[in-house]
Image: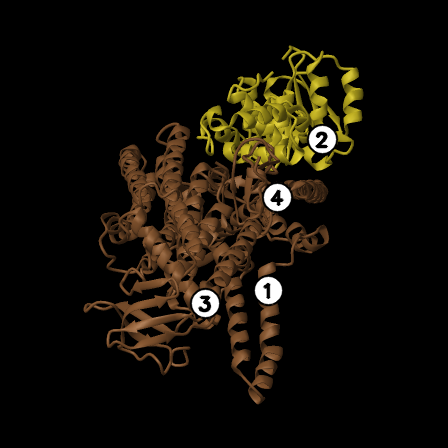
Chain colours: A yellow, B brown
Amino acid sequence: MTKQGMRILVVEDVAASRAWMMERLRAAYGDAGPLVVDEAASLARARQLLAGRPALDLVLLDLGLPDGRGSDLIPELLQGHGDVQVIITTIYDDDDHLFSALRAGARGYLLKDQPAPAFEAALKALRDGVPALSPSVARRLIGHFSAPMADCESADCLTARERDVLVLIARGLSVAEAADSLRISAHTVRGYVKDIYRKLGISSRAEASIKAGRLGLIRLE
Amino acid sequence: MIIRHSPRRVIAASLALLFAVITAMLLLRLQLHDTGMTLTPDPAGGLQVSSMARHGPNAGVVREGDRITAFLTPSGRITADETVVLEEPDVLPDTPAYMAFLADQQRLHSALSAGQLQAEMADGRLLPVQAEPPVWNTLPFLFWMQLFIGFAGVLTTIVVWSVARPDISTRLYVLTGLGVGLSALSAAVYSTRGLGMPADWIRALSIVNHLGALLFTAALSSLLYVYPRRLGDYRPVLAFCFAAAGVCWLLDSLQVAGFIFNHFGVLSIFSLSFVFAFRQWRQTRDYPADRAALRWFLMTIYLGTGLFAGLIIIPAGLGLPLVIPQSFMFAAFLIMFWGLSLGVARYRLFKLESWWRSIWAWLLSGLAIILLDLALIGLLDISGGVALSVSVAIVGWLYFPVRQWLWSRLGGGGRRRLEDWMPDILPLLIEEERGHDQEARLLQRWPQLLRVVFRPLSIRRGEGAAPRMLDDGLVLVVPDINDDAEPWEMHHADGGRRLFNDQDLVNLAILRRLFALTLDLCHARDEGARTERARIARDVHDDLGAKLLTLLYHVPEEARPLVREAIQDSRDLINVLSQEPIGLEAAARRWQAEVQDRLAVAGLRHAWQVSGGLKGHVLSARQFSNLTRVLREALTNVLKHAGAGTVSVRVACDQAWLVIGVEDDGVCDSQALAAGSGRGLAIMRARSEELGASFELACAPGCRVVIRLPLDALSRSGG
């Protein structure tokens, strides 16, 4: 944050949502000096704006944009735009969206249907270094990391073969690629994937890679 | 290498051979002329005519109760005593006595065949004795009984051997059966000979009889050395037993010293079995299954052989008279073999299983047909005139069709080709089942498919490389569809009618490819449906979500919870349509998060309670969605009507049920409940019904909703 005030980019295609978030931003940061807020309704527009604005403090990024997934923009934002905080603002709360955005580098995840005061409070707290997470999102994350795993406390409850499959899937290999690599058939791999999901109490690839990291099977970057 | 054949073929071949031998024995016996007189030793000396055949050749000449003191033949006089009608010459004390016996028999036979035999009666009369060739149905009962015992003994052991793994123990077992068969079939002829018999025949049959006895004993003792446990390297022991038996048999056949070598050989080799049995008993100490098998094995063996040894061999060895005819005592062996057959079913003797009964069923029904055929031939034989035409009619209209049907059932239509089994497997491959995860369900049908195509007598998990054939085609080891899982082991193709062969490997390859193809199709369909659902959901969500958000920002504060709920619904749509099952624990966490959020926004307290083991239960996406909806509606209900302060939510698993309860401390409108109206209630009802769950709504005194879902409806997470 500089003396010129906060430089913020809001990437959001729904006008009403943009307006609502502008209000929330003003309510949260109005007292901290001038706000420089750019608005983009598409990824393309956002990229144009980014080209002319090398330094940013905060980006509120929607995931479902007309020309693509918002999370695709995250790597570009994190490269050469200073110490920018990317906060996802969305109505999706499924694990796939959540985990892939966080893995891509988002520092917060807020649901746009939250009551206004809660949304503002999360933005304010961001200044003090508190990560911006909607309560249900935070709980889901905590649930993933703190609650006992479905059936599995350690990698020991997976068979050697299941561990192999989990590692490959967590690295992003497709079932067919994993099957090739292990020299077994695709339906055999699919069977393992199902068993692994059940044992670990997960339901997506994104979760699989997090679990694999947590079980020490792969290194999370 | 021994060429292996299918069990049924082995049995059929053995049956053919047995019938040939039995026919030979029958023809031999029919050569011996009958006098129609039954002679028994009389305490007063000589032989008494204890019964007379009414239409026999001597009817009217000799009477029942007459006593014969001697027989006169052209080559000399023969004293009529018990030696003449001696059933088993083994009891004679020495070689001279035996030779004299043979000579007497020969003279009696020659004189009788030539019509030159005379009987010297106790009252001094001299009567000519006539004889005629017997008819098959006038042969004595004991003859048939011994044939049957020999037949059944051989067959019983052959059946076991045909289906068992090729192993030294089953080979020895079948030798015991052959031994008894040789003994009983040969004894059948000479022990029921009537009056006189060519000396060479008696000699030859006796030698065969002794061969059988020694073979049985050597095989039995050897068997106890290798079964149930191997007591050591069996080759020297077997070699010794069989060599000793061979030497004894040779010395006995040469008549070096009466029948001493036969009796001595049988008894001493047999006593070896006690030593082995004792060692077996000690060796099986730590193996309860083997011990149980051994116990049954010893009981039946020693009951059978003990009876025979105690009542026949030992008295014969000591030169004592036989209390019970030897012919009857062969039945003791049947006790043994049948006892062992029972043991096979009960203790898996020779590692066989209960399915081997199906072989027996096949065999016995086949024999029943043959016996019925014989009976009908007999019936036709004695009928005449009208009776004959009636018989023919019955046979033509009733018997033949039934027989044909039975045969076709027994035969089973022979080899099954691709076009035969294809129609049977298609339903298994393409049949739809309700619920998620078609692919997983299909995977479990692999052994079922194997069963349909190869119709093995048994199928179970095996080990080692696959596919491969074991025991010369008795067993086919087939890989599982999961490449890493243990393979399947199929025993006895087509219910034991044939062996596995190379064609089965070809069929297996076809079946595997077909199955893999179906799995891929199934997966592609699931995947396609999933992608399409997700796309639809996302479209709806993006459109609807944006509109709902806009709405959210514009409606007054009090309407916002409803809009938020709608947004949550659209989120769930994505989660549900992504169609992944979810663990019950994870599901409960999501419910808790939602309950907490909604009640917090409404300013209500909540009590969350989880009990019972949720771990390991898995909800399908559909089940999760439905339960979530019901829970959500229940909460909406509470928020709308109850005016409550605290809402308790309970998720519990007991033995058989998953129970989800929502209860508040507000005021319940029992009238509204009774009316059962309202969209929310209808939704809760419908969703519960779809789940197969019971749904209960009551005032107690706040509003209470309880959903109970049988745990059976949930799947278990993979171990």
* Pointer 3 chain: B
Q: Amino acid at mark 4?
A: Phe
Nearer mark to the viewer, of 3 and 4? 3
Picture quarter containing residue B446?
A: top right
* Pointer 2 chain: A
Separation of marks 1 and 3 at Cα, in angstroms:
45 Å
Q: Secondary structure at mark 3?
A: helix
Residue B34, can we see it?
A: yes
- The percent position of residue B26, horizontal first and vertical second, equals 48, 62
Relative to B292, does residue B64 appear above or below in the rendering? below
- The percent position of residue A14, horizontal first and vertical second, equals 72, 36
Mark identifier at residue A12: 2
- The percent position of residue A67, horizontal first and vertical second, equals 78, 31
Nearer mark to the viewer, of 2 and 1? 1
Separation of marks 2 and 1 at Cα, in angstroms:
81 Å
Looking at the picture, do discs 1 and 4 lie on one chain? Answer: yes
Looking at the picture, do discs 3 and 2 lie on one chain? Answer: no
Is A95 in front, or is B714? B714
> Which residue is labeled 4 in the image?
B500
Looking at the picture, do discs 2 and 1 lie on one chain? Answer: no
Q: Secondary structure at mark 4?
A: loop
